[in-house]
Each structure stands twice: as C-alpha cells, then as structure tokens.
Amino acid sequence: MMNSVAILGSTGSIGTQAIEVCQMHGLRVTALAANTSVDTLVKQAKELKPEILCIADESRYPALKEAAAGLGCRLLAGMDGLCEIARDSASDILLNSVVGMVGLLPTLTAIDAKKPLALANKETLVAGGALVMDAAAKNGVPIYPVDSEHSAIFQCLQGNKRSQLKKIILTASGGPFYGKTKADLQNTTVEQALKHPNWSMGNKITIDSATLMNKGLEFIEARWLFDLTPDQIEIVVHRQSVLHSAVVYQDDSMIGQMGVPDMKIPIQYALLYPDRLPCPTKPLSLTDYGTLTFAKPDYDTFDCLTACIKASEMGGSAPAIANGANEAAVAAFLARKISFLRIGELVTAAIREIPSAPLSCYEDVTAADKAARAFVANAIA
Ligand code: MG
C-alpha cells in the first residue's frame, strides 16, 4: 500500500477530492502543485504540510513566494517544478490530475523515475499513449487509471485472464445535450454547455462532456491502457452514470462496476490499490434509481466523438492532433470566440488536413500538438 502521495493539479476537482481521500486514510501528502490558484494552494499547504509547493504558471511564482512565506515548503514553478515533483523520491505515488497536454512530460518523468502513477490526465495517454505505455512497460511502472470508466474496466479485469478479454463497454452519460440535433445546438451558450447532469468537474472536461470529445478521448485512452483494437471498444450511452463501464470475456459474460457517480471511488482505488476501504461517498441504492437505461451514441450530432475514433484508427500523431485542436477550440469557445458546434468542425478538419506522422519521442508529440493549435488559431482568425 502507498503511504505518501504527490498531487499535480491539487486545487482542481480531482485534486481536492483526492485530498479528502488522503485525509480519510492517513496518506501523507508530500507535494502539491496548482496551475494558477495560489490562495487555494497555500490554504491546502497550511493544512497538509507538504514538503514542496509548485505553481505551474510561472507568472504567479512571486505571489506564491509571498503567500507561502514561513510555511517551510520548498517552492517551485513551471514545467520544471512539475517534473521535479514527478521524480521526487519522498512520494510513493504521483497523482497526475493536471488538465491537458501539459501533463505529458510530468507523466514521462515519473515513469523514468520508476514512480507509480495514478493517472487522471487523459490527454497524456491520448497524445502520447505509445510513448507512455512503452516507457511504463520498460520501467515496470504501474499506471492506475483514475478516470471513472477506466477505473471500472481496471477493476473488472482483476482476477480474470487478460488474454480471455473479448471487448469492453465504455459507458457515456451522453452529456447535457443528449437527444439534441445539430439544429438544436446551433446557438448553444457557454453557460448551457457548462451544465453537466451527473458529474461536477472542471470547465475543460465539462465542455468535452457536452461535445462528447471526452468520450472520444476516453476511447483512445482505453486503447492504450488496456491494449485494445478500436473494434474491441463499444461505447454505450447510459444516462444515470451508475454503471461506470464493463468488460466482456470470451464466454460472453459481462462484468461491470457500479457505484454512485462520485470520483472519490476511482481516486481511492488508484491510491489504495488493491485495498477496498470505506470511502467518503454515498452508498449506491439500486432501488432509488429503479431504472437504468442504455442506448447507442449519436455519431451524426457529436462530431468530436466520430473524429476521435477516426484519429484512433489513423494512429501515429492523429490522436495528438485531435487533442491539440480540441484544447485550442475549447479555449476559444470558453472565450466566446467560436460557436459550440465549431469545436467539432475544427477537430474534424484538423485530423483531415494535418498529415499524421509516426510518434517516436516527446518532441514528435509536441510538434503534432503545436501544428493542431496553429491550425485552429489560423482557422478562427
Ligand atoms: Mg470519465
């Protein structure tokens, strides 16, 4: 069992819930890193007394220095700081819950230092899946998925023969716009897109859930984590988010993992694996739900989902291009520069227009990411 945890993205939705889990089980928190939120970071540090504090946005470093004076923490900033935490030997496990491609280098750094990973940063696997999984296998580093669907699949694989796995069922809530057509979504506002029916999450992932890009990213993430071919992944819309995903074995037995939609369950499983201890969450009452529903996704309305599956089939840098285009498009949508439907159009166009190339190193991934962001910037200029 792990005794000490370093958390990248500690002030975000996953980070704050992970801290709750650590406090409940007496796990020592050795390092905390946030993107820009100095005040919350310092508040967390006063309570948890970590050895290291890091602010990813270097322009906020003077503010951190001032606010954290007298705490006795080592203060770091930027990508160098994130990577120093990733390789710091004081922690038994690194929880990487930063948002976006920025999480890739800390992930690779942790693997290089042979540090186990609880991975909530899905863009890491989408953009650099081959590099990450190769490095993890070479260094014998376990990766415990924190994404609820991937945690569910990981849980369903325990105690069974991986070679006898037939396929996986990746469940999707369908997001706030389930049942809508493109015509209905023409004038979608930022506020409407930020309202998720089941999960409370950060802005980027909430928009990704509304476009179903999130499910597309998870499709690619699952391929890498569980070494699957695209045709071994079936996406099923399940509005209640109670069945978090399932696996099907050769005997056509389907095993699923269920629970209330609360990220503390997968976070805790990743940090305490293989233990299953009481969790600070509500128990699941099946009779309170009464009915669980399942349906096929609408690939015509949700271009992002279709584009991600296409990118996954194309391989090479195509997933990194899809991810980079989406990160740029979502930022533009949140800044009210483009419409909601334009996000899907831009992701689709990026993988169509930018040639896919093989990925053999970190620089290949960042080049693909940069090309995609430039493509989007140019398209909306
Ligand atoms: Mg998920």
Image: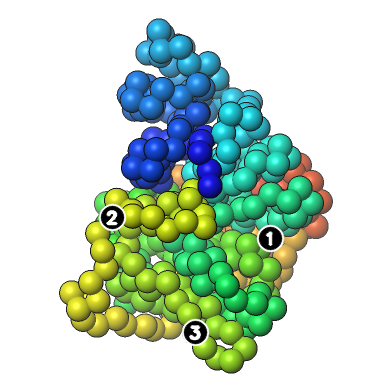
Residue 151 position, x and y percent, is: 49, 62
Question: Which image quarter: residue 11?
Answer: top left
- Disc 3 + disc 2, Cβ < 8 Å: no
Residue plotted at (51% across, 72% down): 156
Residue type, mark 3 in image = Met
Per the image, label 3 sits on a secondary structure element best described as strand
Residue carrying label 3: 254
Question: Which one is nearer the viewer's eye here, 226 or 352?
Answer: 226
Residue type, mark 2 in image = Thr
Residue 346 position, x and y percent, is: 54, 58
Q: Could you tell me if residue 374 is visible in this image?
A: no
- Disc 2 + disc 1, Cβ < 8 Å: no
Where 162 falls versus 201 (above or below)?
A: below
Crowding near pointer 2: few (<14 within 10 Å), some, many (20+)? some
Give the distance between the C-alpha atoms of the residues marked 3 and 2, in whole angstroms: 26 Å
Q: Which mark is residue 318?
A: 1
Residue carrying label 2: 281
- Disc 1 + disc 3, Cβ < 8 Å: no
Dot 3 or dot 2: first in sequence order is: 3
Residue type, mark 1 in image = Ala
220 to the left or right of 362 = left
Residue 292 position, x and y percent, is: 29, 81
Where 335 falls versus 194 (above or below)?
A: above
